[in-house]
Amino acid sequence: MKVAVTGANGLLGGAAVLLLAGRHEVIGLGRGPCRLPAGSYSWADVDLGDGRSVEGALRDFRAEAVLHAGAMTDVDFCEREPETAWRVNVGGTAEVARTCRALQARLVAVSTDYVFDGAAGPYGEDDVPNPRGVYARSKRCGEDAAMLLAPGCAVARTAVVYSGRAGAKSTFATQIVEKLGRGEPVKAFRDQIVSPTLAENGAAMVLELLLETDYQGVLHTAGASALDRVEFARRVAARFGLSGEIVPVRTADVKLLAPRPLRAGLRVDRAAALLREKPIAIGAALERFYQQWMAREAE
Ligand SMILES: NC(=O)c1ccc[n+]([C@@H]2O[C@H](COP(=O)([O-])OP(=O)(O)OC[C@H]3O[C@@H](n4cnc5c(N)ncnc54)[C@H](OP(=O)(O)O)[C@@H]3O)[C@@H](O)[C@H]2O)c1
């Protein structure tokens, strides 16, 4: 099958391209040149903020299935630049969806637990979103754009994505390993409940959703454990045998531009029942993260 992946230089999109390579005809659509390891996939440089660029790449490839994982994910940048957030997260998703409908391609659009306000998570698919801040609101509008313009598509919400793969972007999880490894303390929000998601597990779930189901509507595809960020940091440190200082902080005590949902996280029982690739619990996810890290250090 001809499968296109947007956000292909990203954590989730990159993992998806690498999983698909050699099994399907794959194109990665990314901003600028490819930063993934070489493999059997093609590449197109697209700007999600420019409708013609996305439409052209999907049409030229004659995509049959599209994983839309590209987004402006820097929440504080989005807060400063609402025009860009809107253009990329809403306009880009609308254009991907429109093109999928024209090509009769199946679409899975990736979204976030930030669509919830964080008053009472972890959240299930039937809970009512209440996004706060520009990123969150743009992603929520993107969900509607996808479902309105590509009826039959699925929206896969994920949360706090991380990967230990060589070349993968720096995240809270990788910073814990690096900082503690250098003997520096790590600050962690003690009042933010999250569902950390290993990118490779998340990517496998959304690809199965895309290619092996006709599921329509919202599905939560995150890691199986909801925990606060201090506990997450402790679990990472424990797996890596690192004993440095983890400093608990309150979100309200740190100056942040964009609001953060506090009791967030996603309930994933529906994905666990639907998919062969199960949302994995924190212990198993960190084991894989550790193995990825060791492989990267050995390179
Ligand atoms: N990361 C998280 O913790 C998290 C949590 C919840 C939901 N999500 C959602 O999960 C999906 C995948 O995100 P991710 O975790 O893989 O984050 P990511 O690593 O930031 O990936 C997003 C990708 O989108 C690309 N992008 C941004 N603006 C673009 C533009 N104008 N044109 C083309 N590409 C553009 C970025 O390119 P560059 O690499 O050049 O920056 C990046 O590769 C997104 O829908 C995101 O909202 C992520």
Image: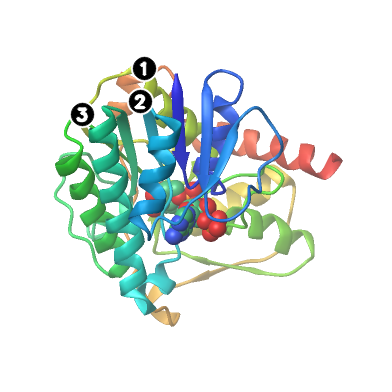
Identify which residue is drawn at 21% across, 39% down. 125
- Residue hosting label 1: 212
Identify which residue is drawn at 26% across, 27% down. 104
Is 95 located above or below residue 86 in the figure? above
Q: Which residue is nearer to you in this view: 147 or 291?
A: 147
Is 18 located above or below residue 80 in the figure? above
Quadrant of the image occupied by residue 243: bottom right
Q: CA distance from mark 3 to mark 2?
A: 10 Å
Q: Position of residue 265 (x, y in %)?
A: 34, 49
Can you name the residue that lies furthest to the right here? 298
Q: Which amino acid type is shown beneath numbered disc 1?
A: Glu
- Residue hosting label 3: 216
Contact? badges 1 and 2 (CB < 8 Å): yes
Q: Residues within 10 Å of mark 1 (few under 14, many from 20)?
A: few
Q: CA distance from mark 1 to mark 2?
A: 6 Å
Quadrant of the image occupied by residue 222: top left
Label at residue 209? 2
Q: Which residue is nearer to you in this view: 143 or 100?
A: 100
